[in-house]
Image (tube, rainbow, N blue to C red):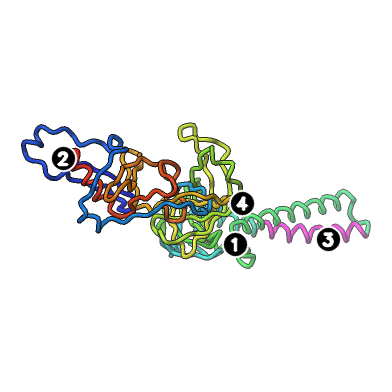
């Protein structure tokens, strides 16, 4: 009869075979007992098998206290820009691709637009009106000073000059917002405006092609993100919130880089508790050298707590799990082992911290757990 268990060191489910059963026995025997049914029972190994068994005596050691929280890598939304066209028109000179790095202020593409042409024409006409208003005001002022023009005519010429100047200022500001250089504001030949990157970063999305006509709606043409920092959004249970505050230093560990730690700090704690998980989202700002952390990667945040505790710890190879329960084998005699249900937690240092089920001085199997478990299954068939 076959049965599968999960061993942390292997990172996979392992199917154990109960050997030594005849065909007739298989037909009539019941299913092998589950691990929780064998808690407290012992198994004795043949002395010849002991060469493959490694054991460790448990001792209390100072253990740095950590809080572990699991989550996902996300974009740092404070460093993400969505590029939206400022005017309707045709995209021209599009040369960037997804994955390209762009600098702040770099031209991504240009837009040829009738609206730009109309704004330029309005600005040119406003300058013509201003020139006329300035000449009219100068002539009227001279006549007024020689008592050849009325006060009313002088006031009207002054008012027309102020209106013309205001219109020039308004149209000039419109062109400045469209990023048209001041030297190009007096020529209708320049009906194109550059669209620049608002920040230095990587082109993450591109939903436009060259010569395409676009509208200034809410759908961005490009998304650019600075990936030198990212966020990790992790779940912290409400019972552990007292250990977390904004500004806490932390290390982020990713499954993709098990030997590396990424420097981080707590940047925000959510104001809402998830009613289903009883957890709170905590946001970590993480330094991301060489952009190795990718959005949507699974990651864990390890927060160092102030106090240092003494406790027992095990290597992951000493523990196997089934149906959410953890088990270990304790040495009770020469070649004799007792299966014990235990509770463990990650300690952040590559070992498992013993929460319950084991005592100081007891010896546990650290290598050969699979062999002992197979022998225990044999004895029950």
- Labels 4 & 2 near each other (Cβ < 8 A): no
The mark nearer the N terminus, 3 or 4, is: 3
Residue 11 in picture, x, y percent from top left: 31, 51
The mark nearer the N terminus, 3 or 2, is: 2
Choose mark 1 or mark 3, whichever is in front.
1
Circle 2 sits on which residue?
1
Tell me how far mark 4 sits from mark 1, CA to CA.
43 Å
Left or right of residue 154: residue 201: left
- Labels 1 & 3 near each other (Cβ < 8 A): no
Circle 3 sits on which residue?
139
> Which numbered tag is attached to residue 85?
none
Where disc 4 sits, the SS reads: loop
- Front residue of 99/160: it is 99
The mark nearer the N terminus, 4 or 1, is: 1
Residue for point 46% across, 32% down? 276
Residue 37 in picture, x, y percent from top left: 28, 34
Q: Residues within 10 Å of mark 1 (few under 14, many from 20)?
A: many
The mark nearer the N terminus, 4 or 2, is: 2
Tell me how far mark 1 sits from mark 3, CA to CA.
34 Å
Q: Range of the magenta residues? A: 126-145
Tell me how far mark 3 sits from mark 2, CA to CA.
111 Å
> Which numbered tag is attached to residue 180?
1
- Front residue of 160/262: it is 262
Residue for point 49% across, 57% down? 224
Q: Main secondary structure of the magenta part?
A: helix
- Front residue of 241/312: it is 312
| Residue at far front of view | 334
> Which numbered tag is attached to residue 247?
4
Tell me how far mark 3 sits from mark 4, CA to CA.
68 Å
């Amino acid at each position: 009869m076959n049965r599968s268990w999960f061993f942390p060191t292997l990172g996979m489910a392992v199917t154990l075979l109960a050997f030594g059963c005849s065909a007739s026995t298989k037909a009539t025997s019941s299913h092998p007992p589950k691990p929780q049914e064998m808690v407290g029972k012992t198994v004795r190994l043949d002395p010849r098998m002991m060469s493959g068994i490694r054991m460790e005596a448990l001792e209390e050691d100072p253990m740095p206290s950590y809080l572990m929280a699991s989550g996902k890598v996300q974009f740092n939304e404070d460093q993400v820009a969505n590029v939206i066209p400022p005017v309707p028109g045709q995209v021209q000179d599009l040369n960037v691709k997804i994955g390209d790095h762009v600098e702040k202020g770099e031209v991504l593409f240009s837009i040829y637009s009738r609206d730009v042409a109309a704004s330029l024409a309005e600005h040119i006409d406003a300058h013509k009106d201003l020139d006329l208003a300035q000449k009219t005001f100068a002539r009227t002022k001279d006549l007024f000073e020689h008592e050849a023009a009325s006060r009313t005519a002088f006031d009207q010429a002054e008012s027309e000059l102020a209106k013309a100047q205001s219109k020039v200022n308004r149209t000039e500001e419109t062109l400045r917002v469209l990023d048209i250089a001041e030297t190009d504001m007096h020529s209708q030949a320049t009906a194109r405006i550059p669209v620049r990157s608002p920040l230095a970063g990587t082109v993450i999305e591109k939903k436009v092609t060259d010569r395409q006509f676009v509208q200034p709606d809410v759908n961005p043409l490009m998304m650019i993100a600075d990936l030198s920092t990212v966020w990790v959004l992790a779940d912290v249970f409400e019972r552990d919130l007292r250990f977390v505050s904004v500004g806490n230093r932390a290390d982020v560990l990713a499954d993709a880089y098990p030997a590396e730690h990424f420097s981080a700090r707590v940047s925000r704690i959510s104001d809402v508790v998830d009613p289903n998980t009883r957890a709170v989202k905590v946001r970590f700002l993480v330094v991301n050298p060489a952009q190795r952390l990718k959005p949507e990667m699974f990651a864990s945040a390890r927060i160092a707590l102030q106090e240092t505790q003494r406790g027992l710890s095990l290597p992951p190879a000493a523990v196997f799990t089934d149906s959410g329960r953890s088990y270990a084998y304790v040495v009770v005699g020469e070649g004799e082992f007792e299966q014990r249900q235990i509770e463990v937690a990650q300690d952040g240092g590559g070992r498992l911290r013993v929460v319950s089920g084991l005592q100081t001085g007891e010896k546990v199997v650290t290598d050969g757990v699979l062999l002992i478990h197979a022998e225990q299954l044999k004895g029950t068939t």
